[in-house]
Amino acid sequence: MVIGFSQVIFMTILALLFMLRANMRNLASFKERAEAYYLCETGASVAILDISRGSIGEGVGKWMNRSFDYDMGRKVYHISYVVTKINGQWHIVSEVGPSSGFSKTYKLNFGGRRAFPWFIRGFGGK
């Protein structure tokens, strides 16, 4: 009876440890996505600043590709963006990826007729 009770307790503890491990992975994934989103938003803000300064010429098909390092605390992130103008509307795609220590590449795409940014949570390639 003692051995059976010990096995039940052992299995319960083992199940709790597996659940804790899964929750920790989910939390780390959420943290990475949140960081990547705001870093991509930083890239988009820099792109908007470049547009407002006139760094990108007017006309159809005009584009600008820029990358920069963003120092935040003890870590430096590499952010890049591409700006295009199609049919009189600006399109911005901001990206942060594995070169900044992320496990995936994240993109924030907005502009044109979209009323809100479209965030790609992450994909393996670049």
Image (cartoon, rainbow, N blue to C red):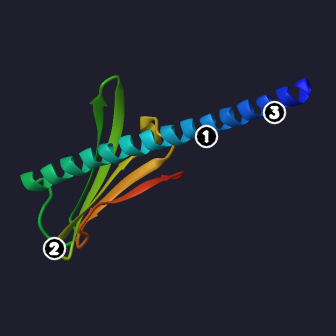
The CA span between labels 3 and 1 is 21 Å
- Asked whether 9 or 64 is in front, the reply is 9
Q: Is residue 9 above or below residue 47?
A: above
Residue at 42 percent across and 45 percent down: it is 33
Provide the secondary structure element on which disc 2 rests: loop
Image marks 2 and 1: residues in contact by CB distance under 8 Å: no
| The disc label shown at residue 22, or none | 1
Which of the 4 image quadrants contains residue 82?
bottom left
The CA span between labels 2 and 1 is 47 Å
Mark 3 is on which residue type?
Val
Give the side of residue 8 with respect to residue 52, left or right.
right
Q: Earlier in the sequence, mark 3 or mark 1?
A: 3
Q: Is residue 31 above or below residue 107?
A: above
| The disc label shown at residue 8, or none | 3
Give the side of residue 28 with respect to residue 20, left or right.
left
* Outermost left residue: 53
Q: Is residue 33 above or below residue 75?
A: below
Q: Position of residue 80 (x, y in %)?
A: 32, 47
Q: Which residue is mark 2?
A: 88
Residue at 16 percent across and 53 percent down: it is 48
- Asked whether 8 or 66 is in front, the reply is 8
Provide the secondary structure element on which disc 1 rests: helix
Mark 1 is on which residue type?
Ala
